[in-house]
Image (tube, rainbow, N blue to C red):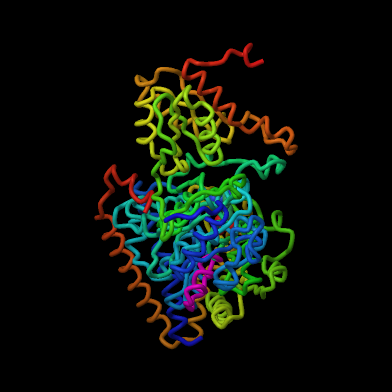
Amino acid sequence: MARAITYSEALTEALAEELDRDPTVFFMGEDIGYGGVFGFAHGLQKRFGAERVFNTPISETLIVGAGVGAAITGTRPVVELQFADFVAIAMDEIYNKAAKWRYMHGGQFSVPLVILAPEGAIGGAGPEHSQCPEALFWSAPGLYVLTPSSPADMKGLLKSAIRDPNPVLIMPHKALLNTSGEVPDGDHLVPLGQAAVCRAGSDVTVVAWSAMVPKALEAARQLKGEIDLEVVDPRGIRPFDFEAVLTSVRKTGRLVIAHEASVVGGPGAEVAAVVAEKAILHLEAPIRRIGAADIPIPQSSFLERWVIPQVDDIINAVRETSGKAVSAAKLA
Amino acid sequence: MNERQLLGLYEGILRCMLWEQGLMSMQAEGRISGFYHSGRGQEGVQVGAIAAMAPQDYLLYAHRGCGYMIARGMPMEVVYSDFLGMMEGSTRGIGAGIVHIAWPSLGILGQSGTLGGSFTIAVGAALSARIRKENKVVVCFFGDGTANRGTFHEAANAAGVWKLPIVWLCENNGWAVSTTFKESCAVSSIAERAAGYGMPGVVVDGQDSAAVHEATRVAIERARSGGGPTLIEALTCRFRGHYEGDAQEYRDRGELDRQRKDRDPVEIMAARIRSSVPNAEKELEAISERVKSEVAGAAEKAKSGTMPPRSRIYDYVYA
Ligand SMILES: Cc1ncc(C[n+]2csc(CCOP(=O)(O)OP(=O)(O)O)c2C)c(N)n1
Ligand SMILES: [Mg+2]
């Protein structure tokens, strides 16, 4: 059985179920006592007590660093950075502590830490509250990085992350919080590192992350009857299910990579490189990447929509790669 | 402090000092790669404070020598093996140029190579003990230079407001590589900062190991009984360069010589024992013999270890 709930509700359910299941799980972050600015912790302090669900000072290095300290000493902390952009404040704690503590101490510790950090553009939040920073962590062995794109994945990935012995940075997309979808009943877990084929198709593979997944599915709907899209959601970047992407590309011979982060230095670069290394002879057209322009995200929502890739950008890229591009003259 | 305790501290200090001498011979033999920050001159702080800890407590050490692990009771040969990069080390062959030695069974939680990383980790360890309802105190060592990291502010404030059982132990040797304490700290004492975090600040003579022990004992007792954190500033001396090979051209020779002559924690403790313990000379001699043979045995044992295979570099990235 399944019920339709929102992405945000799915997140809270996952936290509540894991807090309930395991007394060593706790949740801390700024303003979460009353529920948090995005409401992730709604009702949790009342239910689980202020010793396990509590506010922190505005101290991001503390939030993540204390998470590491708690994780290596027998608890399973979930810590929240109010915005994913703030990974930059706690970068030493994420990149050098959470990711490497186990390795540099010869495997004597595991770091079962979850860092919850909402990402993405929602209209007008500006360059420091709108980014999708996952690509930074391609160079962070030791860390897992997840970007759920649906309520079911939000719940299942977060629950798996909390149970995993490794540090997991999980970045819910703010623009997805109010979207709804079916979530299976019961103890719903989604394994880490397994891509989802969100739509099977035969003509073009679209690898899309996070909020670009619904956009890619919309593109597929609009192109129905013309070009048959296969939409693959890697669900994050670490661990990365390259096999799923390669399998799809070997079938379709065409690849569009779509993410909200900028194309330059974005998470798709590594995917394009690996596909080129391992499947170039299966490609019938150059790989196309769709993402934000190589500029900061402007704080005006009027301007923001031109920076963030939209459904039409995916459709155009798909047409180009499938040799069915509409000429610029025709578009104009 | 009774005779036995004084002799115990002396033995502890000597163990750290002679262990380090052994390490330096290995370095001279070219067996050791990487960086070593000698702890010579600061053993009294490390031994005195750690002697006040209970077995279940957590330790986050600093980079100034290995007195912390030796004093806490890690097998000496294991610490040598870490420096030799051998499989028998605590890090299983990954080495300890920048010391990432850890020994969870003694609560030794490891080290952040980026200075100041341990502050927030100490807070997390204390939170975790509280959530698991275990009566543990965290002792977190750091240098005066490291005290200027922003993480100190975030961690000390959280420890203060949450009344966490943490002892912040600053080894103020007056130097951060070549930068003096005076030129980098806005107040004349690190302990003064404690007021800003709602905890007591205590200054203690770090060359007097018994005094450090007493100050730490009081702080640990306070922490364990729910009284919250304490900031202890132990005034100490760095006898050698920042790293081995640092000629310390930036230091005043006269001052350094005076420190070595008048402020050596080994000599200070020996003098105290001579003036208060009957049969002192015999006791000191016996300790010295015992420690020398312990250190030599550990070095021998460590040298016969095994180097890691190439595949070792891929181990323990993920659990
Ligand atoms: C964040 C960071 N900055 C700089 C360094 C390089 N570094 C290592 S030790 C050191 C000096 C530390 O001084 P202090 O904290 O007083 O300790 P001491 O060496 O005197 O024991 C520096 C600058 C580092 N490892 N991490
Ligand atoms: Mg110093």
The residue drawn where x is 48% and y is 58% is: A113
- Locate the N terminus of chain A by quadrant: bottom left
The image shows residue A261, relative to residue B124, as above or below, that is above
Q: As drawn, is A332 to the left or to the right of B119?
A: right
> Is residue A147 in view from this perspective?
yes
Vertical placement of B274 versus B115: above or below?
below
Q: Residue B297, how many percent across, how many down? A: 28, 64
Identify whether A36 is placed above or below A240. Answer: below
**Camera-nearest residue between A71 and A325:** A325
Inspect this view and state whether residue B28 appears. Answer: no
What range is drawn magenta here? B123-140
Residue A311 falls in image quadrant: top right
Q: Does residue A228 appear left or right of residue A174 in this picture?
A: left
- Give x and y (percent) for residue A29: 61, 60
Residue B175 in which image quadrant: bottom right
- Residue B221 within the magenta-colored segment of the rendering: no
Give how far across and how far down residue A32 sits, in percent: 63, 62
Residue A36: image location, x then y, percent: 64, 60
